[in-house]
Amino acid sequence: MRCRSIDNAIEVIRNHINTTEGKNPEIESYLVSYALTTIYAEYESRLNILIARRCALTDDVHLKNFSQTLAKCGTEVYRVEKRRTGRITLSDLAKILKQFGEDYRDGFTLQIENKPAHTAWDKIVNNRQLVAHQQGTNLTFQELEEAYHESLKVLDAFGEALNLPREHLKDLI
């Protein structure tokens, strides 16, 4: 999965950093903070799109399981009426998938847990959290760029775990 708006922002930041005389770590930190916030927002949006598309499929046992779970107790992770996931740690994503069925969660976990994409996703989410709570980040632009590209595999695995047909993903690639 690709995020063209993020790819474009990263290219602009990279070009700025590479063409500026005398690197300024403070400016780089501001740019990294902006990128972290933008990436997180895009990921949250993509996850919501994937969930909504999966819920749109009919005649499906997993969808019924998810709907029944919401009807019984609701969830803080995903609220259908607001179409927002809230937190997007890997354990939060696994909880969402478990509401569809344990096989969905297990397939996702098998693909991602303790893999480079897991570390990259955590790096994005945790550093964005630091920025959101005004604690700043020590992440360099190069580290951010590497984490971003690797973390995209989490979105791919999430879409695959939802068993979304390829045609439901083509505009997100």
Image: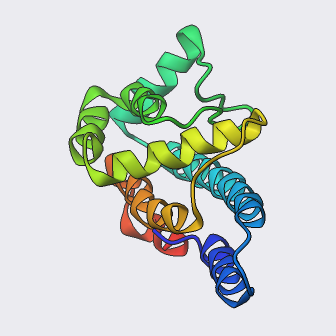
- The quarter of the image holding the N terminus is bottom left
**In terms of depth relative to the viewer, which is nearer, 115 or 165?**
115
Residue 7 visible in this rendered orientation of the protein: yes
**Which residue is at 59% across, 18% downward?**
75
Callout count: 0
Residue 55 lies, in percent from the top left, at 52, 42
Extreme-front residue of the structure: 22
**In terms of depth relative to the viewer, which is nearer, 51 or 110?**
110
Q: How is the image coloured?
A: rainbow
**In terms of depth relative to the viewer, which is nearer, 61 or 4?**
4
Residue 33 lies, in percent from the top left, at 71, 54
**In terms of depth relative to the viewer, which is nearer, 13 or 84?**
13
Is residue 73 left or right of 97 when viewed as pictured? right
Against 10, residue 113 (above or below) is: above
Residue 20 lies, in percent from the top left, at 74, 86
**Which residue is at 58% across, 70% downward?**
3
Extreme-left residue of the structure: 110
**Which residue is at 29% across, 46% downward?**
112
Residue 24 lies, in percent from the top left, at 74, 70
Extreme-top residue of the structure: 73
Residue 156 position by quadrant:
bottom left
Residue 158 visible in this rendered orientation of the protein: no
**Which residue is at 74% across, 64% downward?**
31
Is residue 49 left or right of 24 when viewed as pictured? left
Against 44, residue 86 (above or below) is: above
Against 101, residue 168 (above or below) is: below
